[in-house]
Amino acid sequence: MEAEKSLNFIEEIVEKDLQEGKNNGRIQTRFPPEPNGYLHIGHAKAICMDFGIAQKYGGVCNLRFDDTNPTKEDVEYVDSIQEDIKWLGFKWGNIYYASDYFQQLWDLAVKMIKEGKAYIDEQSAETIAAQKGTPTEPGQNSPFRDRPIEENLDLFYKMNKGEIKDGTMVLRAKIDMASPNMHFRDPIMYRVITDHPHHKTGYTWKAYPMYDFAHGQSDYFEGVTHSICTLEFVVHRPLYDWFIDQFADTDYRPHQYEFNRLNITYTVMSKRKMLQLVQEGLVAGWDDPRMPTICGLRRRGYTPEAIKNFISRIGYTKYEATIDVSMLEASVREDLKARANRMCAIFDPIKLIIDNYPEGSSETLVTENNPDNENAGTREITLSKEVYIERGDFMEDAPKDFYRLTPGGREVRLKSAYIIQCTGCDKDANGNITAVHCTYDPDSKSGSEGGNRKVKSTICWVDCNNAATAEVRLYDRLFSVENPSASEQDFRELLNPDSLKVLNNCIVEKSLAAAKPLDHFQFLKQGYFTADKDSTPEHLIFNRTVSLKDNWAKK
Ligand code: ATP
Ligand code: MG
C-alpha cells in the first residue's frame, strides 16, 4: 500500500479555505468536459481532482457539459462521458449543461450592452486578430467600438434570429485594447452559428457564447467554490474574475485554480488529433485499445484502480511536464498482478506426444490460480497423452544453454504436472516439424512426494482434449517516437507500424471460452490479457493489456 500521501497544493488551498470558514464551509467543484470527443486519460487526471476534492471534503462535484459550440458536439459524446466517469468510480451531484444557461447568459450580455460595456463588431476574424497587438504593443480600437447602444442591441437580436451570416458579426466586451493581459483586449463574447443544430436546443439559438464568458458565469450560477482547470487557463483567470464582477450581486465568488495537464510519452493527448485518427481509420475507433481514451484503456484491460493509482503517483503541480508512458504501464502491471489468474496460452502451438502416457486415458490435476494472491484459490486442469506446447520450447539441435525440449536433453517440467524428457520429433515431407515426442516420469507429479525434484525449466501446455482456439491481439504503443506532437512531421506519420500484431491460431484452456470483457488473465510468460468486447465463445479474442516486463526500456 502507498504511504499516507501529503496534500497536493489544491487540497492545501481547500483546507485553508475551510479553516477560514469561506463559503460557510461549502465545497463545490465541477468537471466541465466539452462533449466533442471521448474522455482520455488526461481527463481522468482532472476527474480525480474535481471529484476527489468533493469526496474528500464532504462537498459535491457536478458534471457540467460545456456545450457552447454545436458544430463539434454530439449526444454520442455526452453518453460516453457519463459512462466513463461512472466506470472510473465517481458520482456526480447533478448534471448541468452550459446550454441550460443560454437565456441567463443572453440576458447578462444584453445588460452589458445597455451599460455600454459591449459592442457588435462587424470586422472579420483576421482583422480583429491583427488589431489585437502583441504582449508588448497595445492593440487598436475597432472602428465599431463606439457604436450607439441601440444599434448594438438591435444587431445583437438580429445575430440570434438568423439574420446575420456566420462569421460576419461578433459581440465583444468593451474593456481595454491596451491591457497588458491580451485577454482583456475586447474579448469576443458571442458569435453566430446558424446552420448547425445544437444537441439540446436545436435551432433556438443562433448566437452562441464563448468559453470565457460562459464558463465563469456557469460556475457562478451553480455555486461552484473551486473551479479547477489546467494551466493554460492561468492567463484567462483575470477575465474570468472580471466577467463575474460585472454581474455578481452577492459576496460569493467562485475561484479558479490551475494544475498541470497530463502529457504522456508516445501518446497524443488531444481530442482533435484523436478524432483525426478515428475519422481517417488509422485506429479502429475511439475505443481502439491503443488509444489513450478511457474506453480504449478499458478495452485494453486497464482497471479504474490502475488509472487512479497512476494519477495519484504523478500528482499535481504548477509546471508542465511529460510523464513516461512506462509509468502508466507499470501501474496496470502492478494492479493486475494480484487480480489476474494465471493461465497457459500457447501462441505458436505444436503437439507434444507423451509416448509412455496410457492411450485414451486422462487425469485431473490441480493448479494454483495466482501465487500472488492467496485468496485466488486453485482450479482443475486435465492432462492426456497429447498436449499443445509453444513451438519455441522445442529445438532439434539445441545449444548447450537451451534448457527446454531437445532430443536427449535435460528434464523439463510440464507446469503443475509431470517431469518429461524429450525423445524426438515428427516431420512432414518438407522437413517441417509436426509434433514433438517425450516420455514422462509418472512418479514426478507436482505436489506429490516425487514432485520435488528440481529441473531447470517449466513449460506451459494445454491438454489437446481441453483446448480452445483463440485470436490474440498484441498491442503496443501507438506511436514510435517519444513526443509525436512536438515533431516537425505530421503526427500521423509517426504511428508505430508494430502497434498491433494479430495471432490467429492460439490455443488456450477451454475454460477461457467463458471469459468476458474486463476479466483479467496473466498468460504465463506472455503478459496480461483481457477478453475483447467482440469475443464470443465461437471466436475468442484476447487483447494484450501489457507485457510482463517493459520491453521498451532496453530499446
Ligand atoms: P483536449 O485538448 O483534449 O480537446 P480539452 O481541454 O479541450 O481537451 P475539455 O473537454 O474542455 O477538453 O476538458 C474538460 C476538463 O478536463 C477541463 O477542466 C480540462 O482542463 C481537463 N483536461 C483536459 N485535458 C487534460 C489533460 N491532458 N490533463 C489534465 N486535465 C485535462
Ligand atoms: Mg476545451
Image (tube, rainbow, N blue to C red):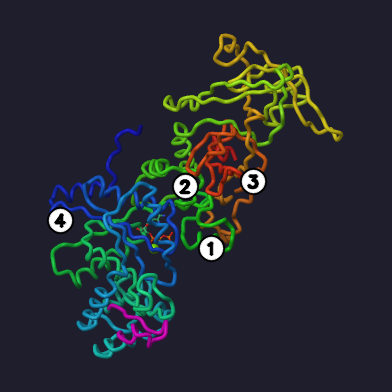
Question: Is residue 494 placed above or below 206 in the rendered structure?
Answer: above
Crowding near pointer 3: few (<14 within 10 Å), some, many (20+)?
Answer: few
Crowding near pointer 2: few (<14 within 10 Å), some, many (20+)?
Answer: many
Is the distance from the Cβ of mark 4 to the nearest ligand 1 atom less than 8 Å?
no
Magenta region includes residue 518: no
Q: In the rendered image, which residue does mark 3 sit on?
A: 502
Residue 522 x %, y %: 53, 34
Question: Is residue 109 placed above or below 217 in the rendered structure?
Answer: below
Secondary element type, mark 1:
helix
Which region of the structure is painted magenta?
156-173
Q: In the rendered image, which residue does mark 4 sit on?
A: 23
Residue 444 x %, y %: 62, 13
Q: Could one spot residue 402 in this view of the protein?
A: no
Contact, mark 1 vs mark 4 (Cβ under 8 Å): no
Q: CA distance from mark 2 to mark 1?
A: 21 Å
Residue drawn at x 34%, y 65% is 66
